[in-house]
Amino acid sequence: MLNKKITMDMTHGSLWNKILMFALPLAASSILQQLFNSVDTAVVGRFASSQALAAVGSNSSLISLMINLFIGISLGSNVVIAHYIGQKSEKNIHAAVHTAIVVAILSGVFVMILGQFIAKPVLLLMGTPEDVIDLAVLYLRIYLIGMPFIMLYDFGSSILRSTGDSKRPLYSLIVAGIVNTVLNLILVIVFKLGVSGVAIATVISNVVSSSIVMVILMHESEPIRLDVRKLTIVPRELKKILTIGVPAGLQGMVFSIANVCIQSTINSFGSATIAGSAAALNYEFFSYFMVSAFAQATVTFTSQNFGAGEYDRCRKIYHISMAFALLSCGLLSAVFVLGKGMFLGFYSTDPDVLYYAEQRLIIATTLELLTAVYEISAGAMRGLGHSLLPAIITVVGSCVLRLIWISTVCKVFHEFWVLIIIYPISWIVTGIIMVIAYNIIKRKVVREAR
């Protein structure tokens, strides 16, 4: 049986405190993961050059594009395992766990190898400036060496979170984050390795975090325990994982394609704009991670309760998570915007860089809480077993709309703020459509289940 001291009973008792206890460590985990990249940009921005800062920052959207498909598949494993936990189906839990880890290994190796070949052509296609391109390619190729370990951490953490355990993945990231920060300072300041130094530090920290999670799984109670001798792909479980995960992953990929196009437009403004946008984007991510954490809580709690037939609790989970996401993201965004001088100063002291960083922070980060409306609604639908519809809505409402904006409005008004304002516009459109879709799906699914 599952370790009762570690797992959380999501199908009985009060919900608001359990959702909060689950989501906060998850938000902290996401923030720490982003800090791997944030520390990279801060160190090279302060101790190397603006070109080095731009090189690291110009890779963020491309890295997301390459890994988001598999991050989505890891979400599929979370939903499937959580559903089995709600049903108390131990044999299926065991099969799903081992299938997920094999998928993690294979996908990580695939992205690592493919990325080495496409790194420079894609960065050139994105219009990366000549004074940045060589450093950007170097950073990306070294970063991709750690991709198998990133996948193992994400899939392993997803398995643990399906049981309600969001704390131990956080602990592993705290250790890895300390390693990353110390190595960054040593390799850049002492050994003068610049971009390659921060990339190496990130790879090593990813090895550390994934190793800790794998050791936890190998010493976990049955049926979650990982046995490397039993690693295999069970076709039935793979199909279920992919049914939920692939639409979510494809959504992330298309979302990232839109961001790559936006990054290409940002690149057209020069290295100062690239660096400023990269600095502000870190705080955008931090605020969004509060939303993402409660969206993940929505997926996991809804999956277990739906599997257990607790349909009224599914409705309560949606409303509680939405309230927490809006409040926490709004408060954190306000802190960053009000203290923009101090926060942006961590990344650069260049006036040109700070000018563009402030523009992005004020326009996008201020309204980041709007993402809660569509993310929580999408999470609830995925917890109910519907992953394709929220993916389609996000692709059309956010990605397609952004691409149309870039090819029309931005062509006429070639200003940085005109480009960035499409973010809150797309969040509003996507949110309205997603809420309507959630209410339709909820009624349909519950009626059929009953």
Image: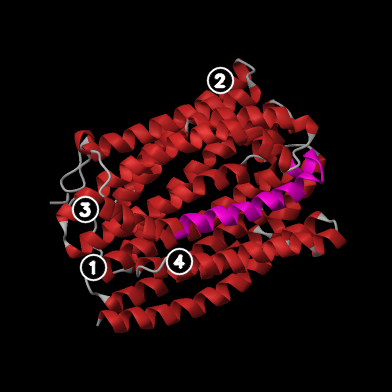
**Tag nearer the camera, 4 or 2:** 4
Q: CA distance from mark 4 to mark 2?
A: 46 Å
Q: Which residue is mark 4?
A: 388
Q: Determine the residue located farthest toward the top in the rendered image.
A: 191
Q: Determine the residue located farthest toward the left in the rendered image.
A: 1
Give how far across and how far down residue 342 sits, in percent. 67, 45
- Is there a contact, CB below 8 Å, between mark 4 and mark 2? no
SS assignment at label 3: helix
Decide if residue 163 is in sight here.
Answer: no
Sequence order check, earlier mark of 1 and 3: 1
**Tag nearer the camera, 2 or 1:** 1
Task: Residue 248: say if magenta.
Answer: yes
Residue type at mark 1 is Thr
Q: Which residue is mark 2?
A: 186
**Residue 338 located left or right of residue 30:** right
- Which label sits on residue 93? 3
Sequence order check, earlier mark of 3 and 4: 3
Residue type at mark 4 is Leu
Q: How is the image coloured?
A: secondary structure
**Residue 290 located left or right of residue 3:** right
Q: Residues within 10 Å of mark 1 (few under 14, many from 20)?
A: many
Q: Which residue is mark 1?
A: 11
The quadrant the C terminus occupies is bottom left
Sequence order check, earlier mark of 4 and 2: 2
Identity of the residue drawn at 39% across and 30% down? 208
Res 120 quadrant in image: top right
Task: Residue 306: say if magenta.
Answer: no
In the image, 145 versus 284, the foreground residue is: 145
Decide if residue 260 is in sight here.
Answer: yes
Give how far across and how far down residue 250 sits, in percent. 51, 56
Q: CA distance from mark 2 to mark 1?
A: 48 Å
